[in-house]
């Protein structure tokens, strides 16, 4: 059968055959299949579920991709009524990527900044079409600021000035039916050499807005950005009130980032990091 490829993916996949793409996808779904993930240590241990992120500005394509992931990972066949746990817990929509490929593919933070209604349409479609046991989540960045607009960074987005504030974004996401939101405390312009400190105060406002607007005092919001150590994890949770913390680049350097080594007194030297990374390989 022909490989499902969105129009927005064609540039990124140029030069790859259908067989190349299918092989890569098969490697991913193989890692998600229940016969591997359900290899628990004992009867009391829970299966560790996975949230799979996709990128799309086309609602129908997003739903097809989500069902492909669920079906091939064994997540839609699971017998939820008997207490079985699906390997894939949720489908996440990428609304945070600031890279150029996201602009050319019309996804990530560019989609959310430049065509937010399309982003909300995708999320609404996912939520209405996927089984209720499968969550729908979104990872976002902070919206452009008035300073970004004044500096002419928004280009064709000038028609949307003033830019929406973060709280408005949270409201629209909740209206779209998402079950969880992750907020990166930077705008799309704050990346690579222009990266600055993550705005944890803005994340705190998003947390408060989500819980007030949804009427759920425990509505799950994850914080992202500015996490380099376990102490940062603790500080971020304290300062933002978030339900959890997500990290990306720092985890590549230290996969044990979320492990509290304070009580053990373990000193992580550069040599220890190298040995540990080789051990993970």
Image (spheres, grey):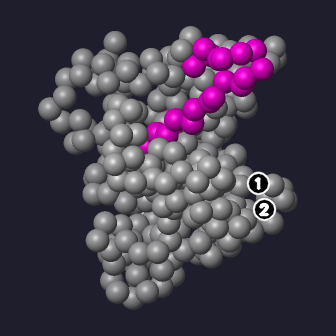
- As drawn, 160 above or below 176: below
At mark 2, the secondary structure is helix
The residue to which callout 2 is attached is: 211
Q: Is residue 53 magenta?
A: yes
Look at the image and tell me whether residue 116 can be seen: no
Residue at image point 40% right, 54% down: 269
Disc nearer the start of the sequence (2/1): 2
Residue at image point 52% right, 30% down: 66
Which of the 4 image quadrants contains residue 224? bottom right
- Residue 253: x and y in percent read 39, 50
- CB atoms of marks 2 and 1 within 8 Å: yes
Residue toward you, 39 or 29: 39
- Residue 179: x and y in percent read 70, 46
Q: Is residue 61 left or right of residue 136?
A: left
Residue toward you, 270 or 173: 270
* Magenta region: 37-60
Residue toward you, 207 or 162: 207
Which of the 4 image quadrants contains residue 187? bottom left
- Residue 198: x and y in percent read 50, 71
Count of marks, rendered view = 2
- Residue 104: x and y in percent read 28, 53
Q: Mark 2 to mark 1: distance in Å?
A: 5 Å
Question: Taken as a whole, is the magenta stretch helix, strand or loop?
Answer: loop
Residue at image point 31% right, 66% down: 192
- As drawn, 156 above or below 133: below
Residue at image point 46% right, 21% down: 31
The residue to which callout 1 is attached is: 219
């Amino acid at each position: 059968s022909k490989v499902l490829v969105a129009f927005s993916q064609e540039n990124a996949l140029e030069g790859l055959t259908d067989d190349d793409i299918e092989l890569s996808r098969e490697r991913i779904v193989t890692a998600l299949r229940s016969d591997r993930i359900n290899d628990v240590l004992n009867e009391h241990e829970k299966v560790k579920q996975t949230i799979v992120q996709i990128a799309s500005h086309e609602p129908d394509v997003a739903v097809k991709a989500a069902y492909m992931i669920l079906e091939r990972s064994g997540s839609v066949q699971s017998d939820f009524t008997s207490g079985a746990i699906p390997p894939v817990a949720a489908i996440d929509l990428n609304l945070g990527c600031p890279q150029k490929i996201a602009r050319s593919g019309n996804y990530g933070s560019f989609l959310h900044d430049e065509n937010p209604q399309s982003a909300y349409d995708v999320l609404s479609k996912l939520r209405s079409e996927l089984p209720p046991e499968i969550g729908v989540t979104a990872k976002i960045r902070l919206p452009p600021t008035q300073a970004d607009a004044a500096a002419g960074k928004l280009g064709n987005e000038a028609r949307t000035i003033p830019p929406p504030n973060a709280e408005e974004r949270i409201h629209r996401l909740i209206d779209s039916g998402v079950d969880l939101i992750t907020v990166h405390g930077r705008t799309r312009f704050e990346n690579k050499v222009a990266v600055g400190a993550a705005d944890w105060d803005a994340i705190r406002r998003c947390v408060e807005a989500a819980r007030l607007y949804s009427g759920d005092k425990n509505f799950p919001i994850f914080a992202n950005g500015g996490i380099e150590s376990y102490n940062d994890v603790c500080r971020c949770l304290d300062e933002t009130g978030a339900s959890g913390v997500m990290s990306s680049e720092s985890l590549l350097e230290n996969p044990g980032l979320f492990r509290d080594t304070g009580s053990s007194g373990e000193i992580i030297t550069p040599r220890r990091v190298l040995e540990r990374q080789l051990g993970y390989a």
